[in-house]
Amino acid sequence: MWMTLYKKLLIYRLYIGIVLLLGSIALGIIGDNWGWFTLVLTLGLIAVVSHFLFGPLRLIQEAVQANDLVAAEKYLKMIQFPGLLIKPVRQGYYLIKSNLAMTNKDFTEAEGYLKKSIDSNNSITGQEYEGASYLQLGMIAMQKGDRKEAKRNLKTALAKGLPDDDSMAAALLQLSSIEIQGRQLKIGRDYFMKAKKLKPKSPEIKAQIREMEKYISRVR
């Protein structure tokens, strides 16, 4: 129940804030209760300002994690002015936009959003988001067949830091593939072993590890 109310508050926060501001104007005109006027005005300002500074990012993240892309797109459209979001939220917003573009195989758009995410880097959560952005840039470069660019971005992702073992394993597996294709077999195997030791939980990455293990066993 409380979560439902919280979601509705985030969805309708801007409209609630506008109604409160209009109510404060009415109270100001009446002018017989300045205490209520101050309270309603303050709540209205908080609602409107927080909508533009924070947006419904939590709802977007929850929708993406639940693989509900329709809901994620709906919540993303609620953010009309992403440039007004505070940097940590703006960085996450562009990263999610990039992930959705990747899902739709629009690599050019995804790359553009990733660069905007990196440009929104901040000292609080910047490293984690920045690492994830470089990981995605590496994946895009792999799709384009640019192994040199992919290698550079994937190494940067690991240096900046990634949020979980699955992400780290994904980066290491891609680096392993690049090195093996470049006939740097020892380096490729080292990257593979590092990825395997992380024991990732994602079924997709587990499958990649099994396939890579078979491939490495055949390479001489």
Image (tube, rainbow, N blue to C red):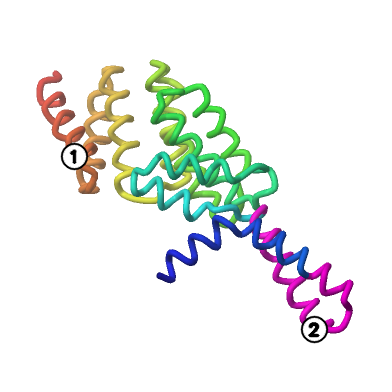
Q: Mark 1 and mark 2 in contact? Answer it, CB < 8 Å.
A: no
Q: Which residue sits at x=43%, y=20%?
A: 148
Residue bearing the label numbered 2 = 35
Q: Quadrant of the N terminus?
A: bottom left
Q: Is residue 27 above or below residue 192?
A: below
177 displayed left or right of 152: left
Residue type at mark 1: give it.
Lys
Residue 206 disc label: 1
Residue 167 disc label: none
The secondary structure type at the circle numbered 1 is: helix
- Mark toward the start of the polypeptide (1 vs 2): 2
47 displayed left or right of 155: right
Q: Is residue 85 above or below residue 30?
A: above
The secondary structure type at the circle numbered 2 is: helix
Q: Which residue sits at x=42%, y=17%?
A: 146
Kindly report the secondary structure that dominates the magenta region of the rendered protein: helix
Residue 47 vs residue 138, the one in the foreground:
47
What's drawn in magenta, residue-wise?
24-52
Q: Which residue sits at x=32%, y=23%?
A: 178
Residue 139 vs residue 70, the one in the foreground:
70
Q: Position of residue 2 (x, y in %)?
A: 43, 71
Q: Quadrant of the C terminus?
A: top left
Q: Position of residue 124 (x, y in %)?
A: 57, 57
Residue type at mark 2: give it.
Gly
> Would residue 25 be counted in the magenta stretch?
yes
